[in-house]
Image: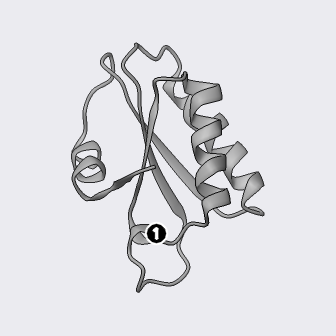
Amino acid sequence: MRLTPEQIMVIKEATHELAGNDARAWLFGSRVDDQSKGGDVDLLVEVDAEVIEPAQLSAKIATRVSLAMHGRKVDVIIKAPNLKQLPIHTVALKEGVRL
């Protein structure tokens, strides 16, 4: 996994502060592969409660993490009981690493 302990801490803190203490963050995509270079940060944030404004939550988490990572591009997808589950959710949970 190509994240520093400090970056992992920022992701977990942003996830808990913005999505709730029970929210879980998963890293997936190229950053999971130690042999890859560069690439954006792909995150899945999983919550057990309904999310009323998922796009806003996703943007807030992505912005906070991006700023902490000096402008690195961050993509965040949300998984919640009231949201449609897409194939990307399955891939992220299957191939991702829980932070």
> As displayed, is residue 57 above or below residue 7?
above
Return the x and y of residue 88 as percentages of the image width and height.
Answer: 28, 48
Q: Amino acid at mark 1?
A: Arg
- Label tally: 1
Nearest to the observer: residue 32 or residue 55: 32
Q: Is residue 27 left or right of residue 70?
A: left
> As displayed, is residue 27 above or below residue 50?
below
**Mark 1: which secondary structure?**
helix
> As displayed, is residue 58 above or below residue 96?
above
Q: Residue at x 57, y 42 (%)?
A: 12
Which of the 4 image quadrants contains residue 40? bottom right
Q: Residue at x 40, y 14 (%)?
A: 49
Q: Is residue 14 visible?
A: yes
Q: Counting other residues with Cα less than 10 Å from the Cα at mark 1, is it few (<14), some (14-19), or many (20 or more)?
A: many
> As displayed, is residue 41 above or below residue 60?
below
Q: Is residue 56 visible?
A: no
Q: Residue at x 27, y 27 (%)?
A: 84
Return the x and y of residue 31 as percentages of the image width and height.
Answer: 46, 69
Return the x and y of residue 99 as percentages of the image width and height.
Answer: 46, 49
Nearest to the observer: residue 76 or residue 45: 45
Which of the 4 image quadrants contains residue 97? bottom left
Nearest to the observer: residue 96 or residue 50: 96
Q: Residue at x 67, y 64 (%)?
A: 72
Q: Where is the N terminus found, in terms of image quarters?
A: bottom left
Residue at mark 1: 31
